[in-house]
Image (tube, rainbow, N blue to C red):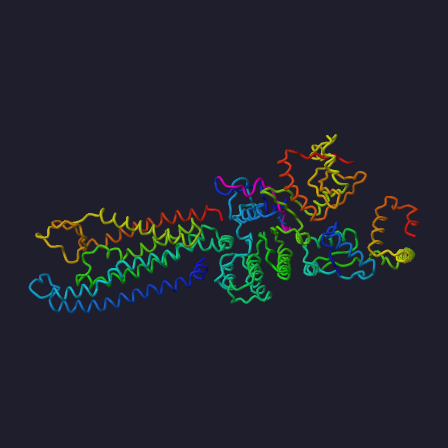
């Protein structure tokens, strides 16, 4: 499940956290399910166990997972509901946008670059105009 | 630590054992023949005090010619062979560990560098001491009939190759090699330095023992030198210095003590080299 | 406060009475259970530092303590593997493990034999007949079965093929999680270090240039990219907020080094507080490699600057 982007600006523990969050949002990790153990992640990725432990600790602070002494780390029993199911309208408008971008000849990388710019825009903070930007 | 030393020096010990066994075997074989020949001489009455009346010159000369080889072979050979062996065993003790960089492993187990050095020197040194004692016993045993047959009674060097002295000389050569290895940290130079310094030290110590111990003098016309006395050529024909046989063991012990003291000093120097020289 | 597993205070070592200083004024504290990367070019002092920590050298000045005492008295808690993992070539693998068993008080015999078996190393093989990777694994077995609290590894991954490297790292990490051991390993190769270590020490020319937790260090630095020469043109103008402000932590920033990439100048800076890049400049957290290389570059350009008699000033772009 985990893959690392070496040499990225994002620290490794944050990459791991982001990937766990993504799995949760996409519903691939269910409430109560056990995450891979630290040892499994370390063996698979040759990554420092402290880093994995840090990622899991931060996720626990965010309330997404719970660690049970001696048993492992488990998805919290009341996580945010799967994003894809709970935000159908946003997902639909996003899919329309992607279709438009493809029609104009944009590749996936270019779409991601546009999204990065949009995320950085100060005006993209909570604002009624924000909804209009992504349409 | 003793298991470790045994494991590391197992094959060395086997070689030394083989060498000493071979030397002793040879000496025993020669001694057997010499004993037989001496018995013949004794039967012919050539060994008793006054032999001028009999035709003993030829058999005595024959005996001397037949057993002259024992002087370079055993009288000089045994202590030298032991010294070279001791140098080859002692030099790699520190030097080869340093050359192979395994000292970085040996000195980072839970044993301190001093304990490692002390154990190695004491255990391996003890082994070599035993080898020296065995060889010394064999030469002492060999020298009996040879002296009786007139080959060796007037030669000092036998003193340095029998009884206790070989143990001391072997361990001195060992100490010099360990120390040279500890300072030079290279195997072959250490062996060379050890052998050269051994020869020098041994000669000096031997000379000291010869000149500093009280001797008895005698005039040949007055009293003959006793049969089992230890003499040496002094050039003068009117006063032959000699040590009576009774002085043999005290002299041996004194010389051994000198050698052991020298060895201890040398090894202390070697310990300094192990401790202070950077890895 | 728990005793750090390694504590160096102004530690320095000189080879001989008039020789070169291998290491100077090294102050470093490693908390227990961390994996510390010691990075620097060849001759930077990495091996000297490791040898001092292992008790193989005595510091000429300053002090070094492992778990509160001199390394010579903590030998059973230190596991040292020298560069190229030297072992006695004519001994067999089980002899070497036997040496470990006889010389170390807390020896885990089962761990040692089980590990050798799992790695497929024949116990009766002579060390001289093993490959570099196998020999490194035997050396690592020696320190793992010893149950050391502090593993000191000198360039352990050099000369290992990728598979051997992965196995070595897996064993190393396993020791960290099971026993809480700290690891201090040196490397002159920066690639792939990011995922292995969580604490970084950059050494150059015998001195510590940078030391700290990796995530904290990244947060405390920025890479600022701008038009070519932006940092130097700022430097030529005397500034209202000179270097001292950055040192006092009152905002501002300290220039570490610059790079020219495709007509743009990219500067690594250390920041005292939150930084907002001025117009035409972009600021971002440095990647691991940018951080390390930036400090190694600093050492380089420091040398050049002193040779040219220039010093760098910095202007706060806020």
Magenta run includes residue A27:
no
Name the spot of residue A3 as percent of width and height, x first: 74, 58
The chief SS type of the magenta part is: strand
Residue at point 48%, 51% (across, down):
B112
Q: Is residue A102 left or right of residue C51?
A: right
Q: Is residue C101 left or right of residue B179?
A: right
Name the spot of residue C76 as percent of width and height, x first: 53, 53
Extreme residue toward the left, this view:
B53
Name the spot of residue C280 as percent of width and height, x first: 80, 40
Q: Is residue B13 above or below residue B267?
A: below
Residue B37 falls in image quadrant: bottom left
Say which quadrant the N terminus of chain B sits in: bottom left
Q: Toward the viewer: C125 or C298?
A: C298
Q: Toward the viewer: B74 or B196?
A: B196
Extreme residue toward the front, this view:
C263
Span highlighted in magenta in the image: C18-36
Q: How many marks?
A: 0
Name the spot of residue C105 as percent of width and height, x first: 52, 56
Task: Tell me if residue C67 can be seen.
Answer: no
Q: Is residue B49 above or below residue B216?
A: below
Task: Tell me if residue A13 can be seen.
Answer: yes
Magenta run includes residue C28:
yes
Residue C164 falls in image quadrant: bottom right
Q: Is residue B115 left or right of residue B23?
A: right
């Amino acid at each position: 499940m985990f893959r690392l982007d070496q040499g990225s600006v994002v620290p490794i523990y944050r990459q791991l956290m982001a990937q766990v969050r993504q799995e949760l949002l996409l519903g691939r990790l269910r409430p109560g399910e056990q995450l891979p153990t630290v040892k499994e992640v370390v063996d698979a990725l040759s990554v420092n166990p402290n880093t994995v432990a840090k990622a899991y600790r931060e996720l626990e602070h965010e309330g997404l997972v719970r660690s049970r002494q001696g048993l492992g780390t488990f998805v919290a029993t009341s996580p945010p509901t799967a994003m894809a199911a709970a935000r159908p309208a946003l997902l639909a408008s996003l899919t329309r946008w992607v279709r438009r971008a493809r029609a104009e000849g944009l590749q996936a990388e270019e779409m991601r670059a546009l999204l990065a710019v949009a995320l950085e825009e100060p005006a993209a903070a909570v604002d009624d105009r924000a909804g209009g930007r992504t349409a | 630590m003793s298991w470790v030393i045994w494991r590391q020096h197992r094959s060395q010990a086997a070689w030394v054992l083989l060498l000493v066994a071979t030397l002793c075997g040879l000496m025993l074989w020669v001694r057997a023949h010499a004993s037989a020949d001496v018995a013949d001489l004794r039967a012919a009455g050539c060994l008793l005090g006054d032999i001028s009346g009999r035709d003993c010159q030829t058999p005595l000369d024959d005996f001397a010619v037949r057993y002259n080889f024992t002087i370079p072979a055993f009288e000089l050979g045994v202590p030298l062979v032991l010294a070279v062996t001791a140098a080859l065993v002692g030099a790699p003790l520190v030097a080869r560990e340093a050359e192979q960089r395994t000292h970085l492993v040996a000195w980072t187990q839970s044993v301190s560098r001093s304990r490692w050095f002390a154990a190695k020197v004491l255990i391996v040194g003890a082994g070599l001491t035993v080898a020296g004692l065995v060889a010394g016993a064999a030469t002492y045993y060999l020298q009996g009939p040879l002296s009786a047959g007139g080959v060796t009674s007037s030669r000092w060097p036998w003193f340095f190759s029998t009884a206790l002295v070989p143990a001391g000389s072997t361990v001195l050569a060992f100490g010099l090699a360990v120390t040279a290895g500890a300072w030079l940290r290279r195997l072959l130079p250490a062996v060379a330095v050890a052998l050269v310094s051994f020869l020098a030290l041994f000669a000096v110590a031997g000379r000291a023992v010869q000149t500093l111990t009280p001797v008895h003098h005698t005039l040949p016309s007055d009293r003959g030198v006793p049969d089992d006395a230890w003499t040496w050529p002094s050039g003068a024909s009117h006063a032959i210095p000699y040590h009576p046989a009774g002085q043999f063991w005290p002299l041996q012990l004194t010389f051994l003590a000198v050698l052991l003291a020298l060895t201890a000093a040398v090894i202390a120097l070697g310990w300094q080299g192990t401790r202070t020289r950077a890895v | 406060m728990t005793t750090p597993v390694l504590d160096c205070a102004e530690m320095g070592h000189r080879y001989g009475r008039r020789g070169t200083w291998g290491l100077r004024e090294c102050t470093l504290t490693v908390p227990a259970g961390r994996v510390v990367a010691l990075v620097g070019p060849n001759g930077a002092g990495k091996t000297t530092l490791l040898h001092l920590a292992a008790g193989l050298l005595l510091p000429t000045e300053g002090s070094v303590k492992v778990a509160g005492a001199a390394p010579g008295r903590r030998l059973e808690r230190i596991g040292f593997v020298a560069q190229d993992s030297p072992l006695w070539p004519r001994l067999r693998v089980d002899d070497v493990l036997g040496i470990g068993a006889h010389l170390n008080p807390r020896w885990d015999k089962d761990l040692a034999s089980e590990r050798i078996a799992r790695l497929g190393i024949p116990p009766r093989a002579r060390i001289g007949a093993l490959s570099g990777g196998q020999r490194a694994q035997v050396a690592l077995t020696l320190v793992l079965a010893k149950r050391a609290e502090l593993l000191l590894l000198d360039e352990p991954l050099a000369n290992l093929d990728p598979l051997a490297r992965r196995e070595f790292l897996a064993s190393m990490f396993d020791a960290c999680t099971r026993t809480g051991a700290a690891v201090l390993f040196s490397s002159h190769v920066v690639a792939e270090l990011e995922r292995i270590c969580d604490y970084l020490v950059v050494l150059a020319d015998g001195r510590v240039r940078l030391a700290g937790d990796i995530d904290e260090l990244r947060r405390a630095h920025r890479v600022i990219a701008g038009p070519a020469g932006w940092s130097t043109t700022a430097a030529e103008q005397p500034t209202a907020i000179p270097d001292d402000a950055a040192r006092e932590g009152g905002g501002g920033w300290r220039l570490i080094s610059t790079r020219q990439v495709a007509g743009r100048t990219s500067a690594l800076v250390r920041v005292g507080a939150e930084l907002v890049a001025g117009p035409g400049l972009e600021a971002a957290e440095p990647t691991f490699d940018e951080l390390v290389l930036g400090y190694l570059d600093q050492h380089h350009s420091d040398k050049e600057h002193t040779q040219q008699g220039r010093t760098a000033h910095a202007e706060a772009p806020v």
